[in-house]
């Protein structure tokens, strides 16, 4: 089963270049932008004044308690120079940095901002480390340009010691934590050492320690909770491997989430943020998927224990199928979850499925047939795990059923894997579904056996059938049936009502031993498959043994079966 998930990964990696090629083809097939109609510029970004007004109004609304307006503020920034993996988080942070720079420079008078649609970039203010500038993009939008966005961290450090020039909405609870902390720190903590400021290094150390503490605490609580749960269901413990460590990934996930939140609060530079955030996101996503994967084993063990306690054997087959289905779902959802956390756009990948749809459909033909074959077996209850079946030339016990194939353990201990699509049309002889197990045989008696003894022997065998608890009483046949080449043949046609083959063999032995005891008690001998020449000389004085009557034969049979029942 583990190789199936590897196959899913290979398919994913195969579709990735297909997606990229499809995107390249779409780009090549796209009409020339010079001949196409220019895109419509939104009114909120059609001039420097509109862009500045949109940004300030959105940020002020956020301070008034409308955080959903952050998207409107971010759209005024040219984030093309920010790595896509951290663009979402970085965009919000940069918007607050820009507002802080504007507020500590001078109040913005919108009437003084030009309202033109064409022309050179408009500069709000020039600083030592750069300038705040709104430039016109190729599509006609006016945005705080890429150079301004790149210079914002340095500009924020330059104006950090200035007083806020804007009055009115001084509430700073909406500001990012790193800006509020930076306002309160002394200069030596704001000094930059080895890429980061001193207080950011201390913050990273604190976040790492906090994450490790959370990991340890969550591990302890997980083991405690698992131990209490297993005490409620003691029979489940044997079905779970390493039950005490089953929820170990949960601690890793919580530790990674603590690191994730902490890194976002420190206002790290883009390069450092990219490295740390991608690593932490990947760790958190993998740990979360790993936790869900292991929880499936716990739930499956509980379901398997419940299924084992019922007489219905269909649920014994459904539990492994449910476990595998959930794991496949978690594997697929995990890929999407990880891609989403890394800000990877998977729409192109999904579009690439259209290009490889035909090849995938052809490759999945057998998979679909096998799936419907497994559904057919479950719906029709053709067989279940443990049944003795015969499929064409394959005979054995069903050991495992899956969505793709069924594994049959033959009586010479080999393992045969049969695709489930075969069961749609194949003739399946379910020997395990028999209510009665038949036994047909001919007992050969020697030719010197008197008719009275033959009749007594047959009646004794019938009484054995009547006395045995597992033998079918309403239908059986025991008769002197034929004169064979070397024996007088007695037909034995009986049935046992036993749940499995082992019980059948046990009861068959019991019946045959009782038959031998009966023959010995009646003086009946079984014939060998040979020809014997007898030279018989009449002895006038020898006494003849009287033949038992039918009632005596029944009494002997009752004594024999009673003796057999008394034995362990």
Image: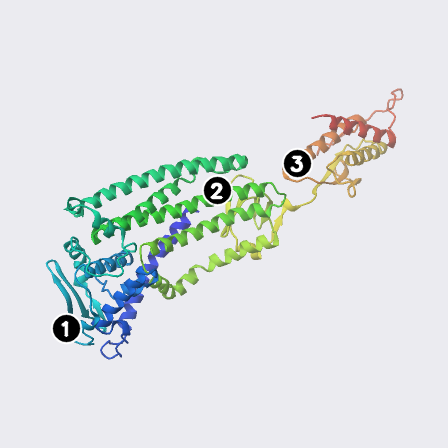
For the residues marked 3 and 2, what is the alpha-carbon distance in whole angstroms? 34 Å
Q: Earlier in the sequence, mark 2 or mark 1?
A: 1
Which residue is labeled 1 in the image? 120
Furthest-top residue in this view: 541
For the residues marked 2 and 1, what is the alpha-carbon distance in whole angstroms? 65 Å
Q: Nearer the viewer, residue 43 or 167?
A: 167
Q: Position of residue 422 (x, y in %)?
A: 54, 55
Q: Earlier in the sequence, mark 3 or mark 1?
A: 1
Q: Left or right of 550: which side holds 102?
A: left
Of tags 2 and 1, the one toward the viewer is 1
Q: Left or right of 279: which side holds 411?
A: right
| SS state under label 1 | loop
For the residues marked 3 and 1, what is the alpha-carbon distance in whole angstroms? 96 Å
Mark 1 burial class by Cα count in 10 Å: few <14, some 14-19, many 20+ = few
The C terminus appears in which quarter of the rendering? top right
Residue 426 can be seen, yes or no: no
Mark 3 burial class by Cα count in 10 Å: few <14, some 14-19, many 20+ = some
Which residue is labeled 3 in the image? 503
Q: Is residue 526 above or below residue 211?
A: above
Q: Position of residue 302 (x, y in %)?
A: 53, 42
Q: Left or right of 412: which side holds 152?
A: left
Of tags 3 and 2, the one toward the viewer is 2
Q: Are marks 3 and 1 in contact (CB under 8 Å)?
A: no
Which residue is labeled 2 in the image? 298
Q: Nearer the viewer, residue 20 or 366?
A: 20
Q: Is residue 103 above or below residue 538?
A: below
Q: Earlier in the sequence, mark 3 or mark 2?
A: 2
Residue 51 can be seen, yes or no: yes
Q: Position of residue 170 (x, y in %)?
A: 26, 57
Query: Looking at the image, how many numbered discs can be counted on the residues?
Result: 3
Q: How is the image coloured?
A: rainbow
Q: Position of residue 328 (x, y in %)?
A: 44, 51
């Amino acid at each position: 089963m583990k190789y199936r998930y590897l196959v899913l990964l290979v398919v994913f990696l195969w579709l990735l270049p297909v997606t990229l090629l499809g995107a390249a083809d779409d780009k090549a097939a796209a009409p020339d932008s010079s001949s196409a109609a220019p895109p419509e510029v939104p009114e909120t970004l059609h001039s420097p004044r509109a862009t500045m007004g949109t940004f300030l109004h959105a940020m002020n609304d956020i301070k008034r308690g409308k955080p959903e307006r952050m998207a409107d503020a971010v759209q005024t920034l040219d984030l093309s120079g920010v790595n896509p993996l951290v663009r979402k988080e970085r965009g919000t942070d940069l918007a607050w940095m820009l507002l802080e720079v504007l507020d500590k420079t001078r109040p913005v008078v919108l009437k003084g901002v030009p309202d033109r649609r064409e022309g050179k970039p408009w500069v709000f203010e020039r600083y030592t480390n750069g300038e705040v500038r709104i430039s016109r993009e190729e599509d006609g939008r006016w945005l705080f340009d890429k150079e301004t966005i790149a210079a914002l961290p340095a500009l924020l450090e330059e104006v950090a010691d200035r007083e806020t020039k804007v009055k009115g909405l001084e509430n700073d609870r909406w500001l990012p934590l790193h800006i509020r902390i930076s306002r309160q720190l002394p200069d030596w903590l704001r000094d930059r050492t080895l890429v980061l400021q001193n207080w950011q290094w201390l913050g990273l150390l604190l976040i790492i320690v906090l994450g490790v503490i959370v990991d340890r605490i969550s591990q302890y609580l997980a083991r405690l909770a698992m131990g209490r749960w297993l005490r409620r269901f003691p029979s489940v413990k044997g079905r779970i491997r390493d039950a005490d460590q089953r929820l170990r990934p949960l601690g890793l996930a919580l530790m990674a989430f603590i690191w994730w939140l902490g890194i976002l609060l420190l206002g790290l530079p883009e390069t450092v943020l990219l490295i740390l955030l991608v690593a932490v996101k990947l760790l958190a996503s993998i740990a979360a998927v790993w936790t869900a994967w292991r929880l499936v084993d716990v739930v499956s063990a509980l379901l398997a224990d419940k299924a084992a306690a019922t007489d219905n054997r269909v649920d014994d087959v459904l539990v492994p199928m449910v476990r595998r289905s959930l794991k496949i779902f978690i594997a697929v959802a995990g890929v999407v979850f990880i891609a989403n956390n890394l800000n990877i756009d998977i729409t192109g990948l999904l579009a690439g499925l259209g290009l490889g749809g035909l090849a995938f459909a052809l490759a999945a033909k057998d998979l679909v047939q096998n799936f419907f074959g497994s559904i057919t077996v479950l719906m029709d209850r053709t067989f279940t795990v443990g049944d003795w079946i015969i499929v064409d030339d394959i005979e054995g016990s069903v050991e495992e059923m899956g969505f793709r194939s069924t594994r049959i353990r033959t009586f010479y201990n080999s393992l045969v894997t049969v695709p489930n699509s075969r069961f749609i049309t194949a003739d399946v002889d379910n020997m395990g579904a028999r209510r009665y197990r038949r036994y047909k045989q001919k007992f050969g008696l020697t030719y010197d056996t008197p008719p009275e003894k033959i009749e007594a022997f047959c009646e004794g065998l019938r009484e054995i059938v009547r006395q045995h608890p597992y033998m079918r009483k309403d239908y059986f046949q025991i008769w002197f049936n034929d004169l064979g080449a070397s024996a007088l043949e007695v037909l034995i046609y009986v049935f046992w009502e036993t749940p499995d083959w082992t019980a059948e063999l046990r009861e068959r032995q019991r019946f045959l031993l009782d038959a031998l005891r009966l023959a010995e008690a009646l003086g009946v001998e079984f014939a060998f498959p040979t020809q014997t020449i007898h030279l018989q000389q009449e002895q006038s004085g020898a006494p003849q043994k009287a033949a038992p009557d039918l009632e005596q034969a029944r009494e002997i049979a009752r004594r024999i079966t009673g003796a057999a029942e008394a034995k362990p």
